[in-house]
Amino acid sequence: MTASSGRRTALRRVFKLDFLTRFLTLVMMKATVTSNGRITIPLPIRRQLKLHAGTVLEFDERADCLKATKAVDPERMRAVIGIGKEELATRTTLEWLEELRGPAGLPPRPRGKSPCKN
């Protein structure tokens, strides 16, 4: 066995171990409860759910598993109700959606028989 083949074998082992570690981390993440009852939510989950410092979570104790949802602030929700009322009054729903999403092109109709005619 040469030195270069020994290095390749070692690199393969490291790659397999690194890949396996990353795969298992993505599939199943763990957190430990501290003596104060605190846990650290893994970073990939915080990023995916857009959880930032100060985000309030509500826990459902009736669930079979640990279930937390972002708490909704009723005052913030009430503050945005009706802000587009004047702008929406002069436009149709399709006009409003086109402004928000941009124009949507329909796929071309197939030539030949019409699907509505017998």
Image (cartoon, rainbow, N blue to C red):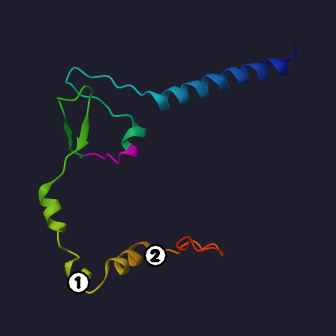
Q: Which residues are magenta?
A: 47-54
Which is more toward the observer, 86 or 73? 86
Q: Which quadrant is the N terminus positioned in?
A: top right
Residue depicted at 19% across the width and 46% down the height? 71
CA neighbours of label 2 inside 10 A, class few (<14), some (14 to 19), many (20+): few
Going by the numbered disc 1, the residue's amino acid type is: Ala
The quarter of the displayed image where residue 115 is located: bottom right
Estimate the x, y position of residue 3 in percent, counting from the top left. Answer: 84, 18
Residue depicted at 52% across the width and 72% down the height? 116
Q: Is residue 9 left or right of residue 55?
A: right
Going by the numbered disc 2, the residue's amino acid type is: Gly
Q: Farthest residue toward the bottom?
A: 90
CA neighbours of label 1 inside 10 A, class few (<14), some (14 to 19), many (20+): few
For label 1, the residue is 89
Structural distance between the alpha carbons of marks 2 and 1: 20 Å
Assess whether residue 39 is covered by the magenta stretch: no
Estimate the x, y position of residue 28 in percent, counting from the top left. Answer: 44, 27
Disc 2 is placed on an element classified as: loop
Q: Farthest residue toward the right?
A: 2
Estimate the x, y position of residue 57 in percent, counting from the top left. Answer: 22, 41
Q: Check the image and report above or below for 102 versus 36.
A: below
For label 2, the residue is 102
Q: Farthest residue toward the top?
A: 1
Residue depicted at 15% across the width and 66% down the height? 79
